[in-house]
Image: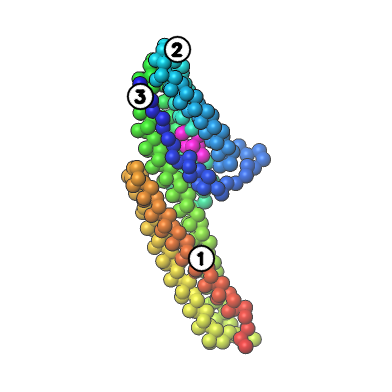
Amino acid sequence: MLFFSFALFLFLNSGTVFAQEEMDTEGSEIPTVTSVYADYTKIIDEYTKAHDDFIVKRAQYLRFKTLKSQEDAQASTLSMLQKRDDVVVSYLKVLQSRIEEAVGVTDSRRDALNFRINEEIQWFTEHKEILTSAASLSDLVRDSAKAKLRFYSVISLAYEVLANTSYGHIVDFQERVKDLQRNLKVKVEDIKSEERDEYKLSNNKLQVIDRWIFESDNRIVRGEERQNGAEINIIDLSGYTGISVLGSYNQTLTKLGESQLYYKEASSFMREVIREIKVQDL
């Protein structure tokens, strides 16, 4: 009799994916990533125990081929598959809480991802209920294969959620950098229009300031180019499956990392502008 054990590879990345969790707020009605992730790890432990029992019962059935060992094997297989569905549902809820708390994500994109997550939660919840109607080990194997096939869509969705979360952080960073840029340019223009001698800056200093602002502007433009490229990648993620999803996801993170680096450089150049304004000519 064929038995199928379904490896959820995303568990291996959970420690890094959800490293930046916020603590629960007292009296909060909406579960935070921290609380949902705690439930998720608990369910993983339950699944692990059920899977270990399944391995033992499977070995006993394959060895003895008795009616009792077959009944035990079927019961342990049912329990393991149900726990496995619980793990997938719990993981989807973690993703859902993650996208809910993410900064820089538009409402329309958040709603679209939540809709798809809820569809997957409903599918695996119903699949768990259907498992109880299995009359034989063969039925459970077929039901397990259906879950395996469905899980591919969960993988793609998970990477979309994680990519959008990372993208949102860059959007938030970009907005703060551009706010600083706008305010700084206004201040520099005020300084240039100053008529009082004691508050005027030398032409040399103004040239240095203009150069730093020019370099800062260039870095922001390059950062936005990388950011836009990452956004295109994210839009295309839903069309990928298997290894191609991971490849596209990694390309997205690379572009976001480059965008972040350019924004950081822009910020450092603007700090040089502020330093030039504060430091008196010798």
77 over 163 or under it: above or below: above
Q: Is residue 89 magenta?
A: yes
Front: mark 1 or 2:
2
Amino acid type shown at disc 3: Leu
Q: Of the residues under marks 2 and 3, which one precedes in the sequence?
A: 3
**Rendered image quadrant of residue 255:** bottom left
Viewer-nearest residue: 145 or 198? 145
**Rendered image quadrant of residue 132:** top left
Describe the element under mark 1 as helix, strand or loop: helix
The residue where tag 2 is placed is 68
Residue at 49%, 24% (x, y): give it. Answer: 53
Describe the element under mark 2 as helix, strand or loop: helix
Q: Of the residues under marks 1 and 2, which one precedes in the sequence?
A: 2
**Rendered image quadrant of residue 60:** top left
Residue 149 visible in rendering: yes
Disc 3 crowd rating (10 Å Cα; few below 14, some 14-19, many 20+) is: few
What span is in magenta?
A: 88-94
Viewer-nearest residue: 116 or 258? 258
The residue where tag 1 is placed is 264
